[in-house]
Amino acid sequence: MVEIKKRKLLAKLFAEKDRQKIAIILGPRQVGKTTLLKELHKKLGGLFLDLDVLENFEKVGSFERLINTLKLNGYEEKQKGTFYLFLDEFQHYDVMTKIMKNVFDNCKNVKIYASGSSSLKIKEQVQESLAGRKSIYYLYPLDFEEFLWFKEEEEALKQYKNAGKLEGEDLNLGVLEGLLCEYLVWGGYPEVVLGRGADEKQDVLKSIFDLYVKKELVNYLKLEDVVGAKRLVEFLAVNNGKKIKYEEAASACALKQYAVRAYMGVLGETFLIKTIRPFFTNKNKELVKMPKAYFLDNGVRNFFINNFNEVDIRE
């Protein structure tokens, strides 16, 4: 039996189990949100539904149907204990936020955990319906500590956690160097981290982007706009961490400047990039200065520039 690798966020979400809030987990696809919900379901019981499957949505597509489905799975309206409901990829259906609101308002013994892959669509949905009723958590690709944990590098973990305390022969940062280089090149998507060899890792990264285009970009952009957005992604990958000149980006990608700004917004809200503006005490200055764009995951960035060379031989 394959051991499930656990994320840091699991403990925080488990501690949320008695809190009167809907717990919403946001993040890119394939970072482990589904696995996280399944781990919580395993610990807490209740009902798990993947709403990517239409049949499952039909079971909960109205408040009445959802309550009936809960009852078929062991829920009793007057039960003293909490019944846990786990909804994966709920953002596909606008009606789900209203249904969750009704459950929250009318069934105080039901606790909902829900996950989604697009903060843009979810923000639109929950802004009004779930005001005051939700806690939002973010799950990103593995950080370096989780990377070491997933790879079962116990000595490296010890060195990483105690680098400020270890001395003399006990301090061996060299054990971290090769692993850090691997992390910087391939990033922290769990399936990539666990992949065997460069070819398998590249195949996983390709599948991640293909799914991103089908499930995220196509939901927001027309087909011709998706092509332009892909060109912009490649431009941003080459210019990762540099100031973004919208005029230059528009020219390089054969886009209008307003389209560059709009697409960058979509890329940010779908967890591909993070845009950061320079800090000024004068906020008006901060707003007009050129931002920098960073990919949330180095492996994805390196996929777009087709460069998986070791760190020390890069230009």
Image (spheres, rainbow, N blue to C red):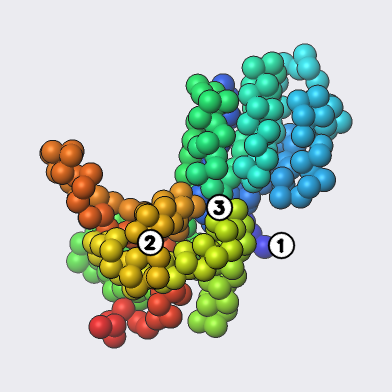
Q: Position of residue 76 (x, y in %)?
A: 80, 20
Question: Which type of secondary structure does the marked residue at label 1 adopt?
Answer: loop
Q: Nearer the viewer, residue 273 or 21?
A: 273
Question: Which type of secondary structure does the marked residue at label 3 adopt?
Answer: helix
**Residue 256 marker:** 2
CA–CA distance in space, label 2 to label 1: 52 Å
CA–CA distance in space, label 1 to label 3: 39 Å
Q: Name the quadrant of the C terminus.
A: bottom left
Residue for point 50% across, 21% down: 132
Residue for point 52% across, 68% down: 227
Q: Position of residue 294 (x, y in %)?
A: 33, 60
- Mark 1: which amino acid? Met
- Of circles 2 and 3, which is in front? 2
Are the residues tagged 1 and 3 within 8 Å (C-beta)?
Answer: no
The extreme right residue here reads 72
- Mark 2: which amino acid? Lys
Are the residues tagged 2 and 1 within 8 Å (C-beta)?
Answer: no
Question: Which type of secondary structure does the marked residue at label 2 adopt?
Answer: loop
For label 1, the residue is: 1
- Residue 234 seen anywhere in this rendered image of the structure: yes
For label 3, the residue is: 220
The extreme front residue here reads 256
> To which quarter of the image does residue 102 belong?
top right
Residue for point 78% across, 17% down: 77
Asked if residue 256 lies left or right of residue 45, the reply is left
**Residue 77 marker:** none
